[in-house]
Amino acid sequence: MIKDKTIWECSSCGFTQKKWAGSCQSCLTWNSFFEKIQIDEKAKRFEAKKTDARPVRLKDVKMSNFKRLETNFRSFDRLLGGGITKGSLILIGGAPGIGKSTLLLQLSNTFALQNKKVLYISAEESLEQTSLRAQRIGIDNENIFLFSETNFSAIKLQIDQIKPDILIVDSIQIIYKPEIGASPGSVVQVRELTTEFMHISKGYGISTFLIGHVTKTGEIAGPRVLEHIVDVVLDFEGEKQNGFRLLRSVKNR
């Protein structure tokens, strides 16, 4: 029987320790520790779980059901090796105003035209703002569902009800889990939310896009572990003064 244990985690940098302290010894932030229940991972690895899964010989693995969903943007599909795979988790990072939301709305339309159900989570903008953006680029499809929300619990409820084929989260730094005592965009919030969306993608077979902002140094805001959790990392680059944009693949597994 696995027993839970209590640890204290810094909401600023994610550092953990066994006892509460006034300041974090890692990032020196004051009053940043919150209590967290943690399962004993060592015991968890040895816990037997009932499952119908069985090992399969490598030569017996059939790829007949493996099919990539094309976006009809040839350069984008080529960047991803021919399209997106079912249940993949894709992170697109870029500076504010570079065009991430516009790109994802255009991709939403290509999926919707293929009779795929798309759930677009607009955490930064209202429904009216997102709708105006869609109208400006000529998008109006009944297979696209907009939801303006920042609370993960409410988002998860809509995912369960709508059961989309494609999920777009705009953006991961704005959403929060109420049970975590940290502000949206903090290290612990971003890490936990990315893990949650990873479980949703793999468990439900939903191809998921996460939009992420970048720091002044050009790195995606949040913990480095974020890039290890996702399947694909894309950098969206360019200058606001001209219309040229560069989409670069940093990771694609």
Image: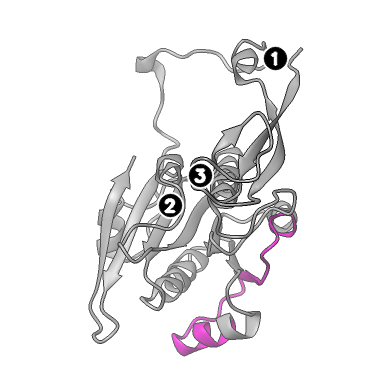
Helix, strand or loop at label 1? It is loop
The residue that appears at 61% across and 69% down in the rendered structure is: 123
- Residue nearer the viewer, 44 or 17: 17
Residue type pointed to by label 2: Ile
User: Considering depth in this image, is 180 or 172 the residue closer to the camera?
Assistant: 180
Dot 3 falls on a residue whose secondary structure is loop
* Whole-number angstrom distance, CA of label 2 to CA of label 3: 10 Å
- Give the percent coordinates (x, y) of residue 183: 63, 59
Q: Is residue 43 left or right of residue 168?
A: right
Earlier sequence position, callout 3 versus callout 1: 1
Contact? badges 2 and 1 (CB < 8 Å): no
Q: Which residues are magenta?
A: 131-155
| 142 magenta-colored | yes
51 left or right, relative to 248: right
Q: Residue 37: which quarter of the image? A: top right
Could you tell me which residue is drawn at 58 percent across and 35 percent down?
16
Residue beneath disc 2: 90
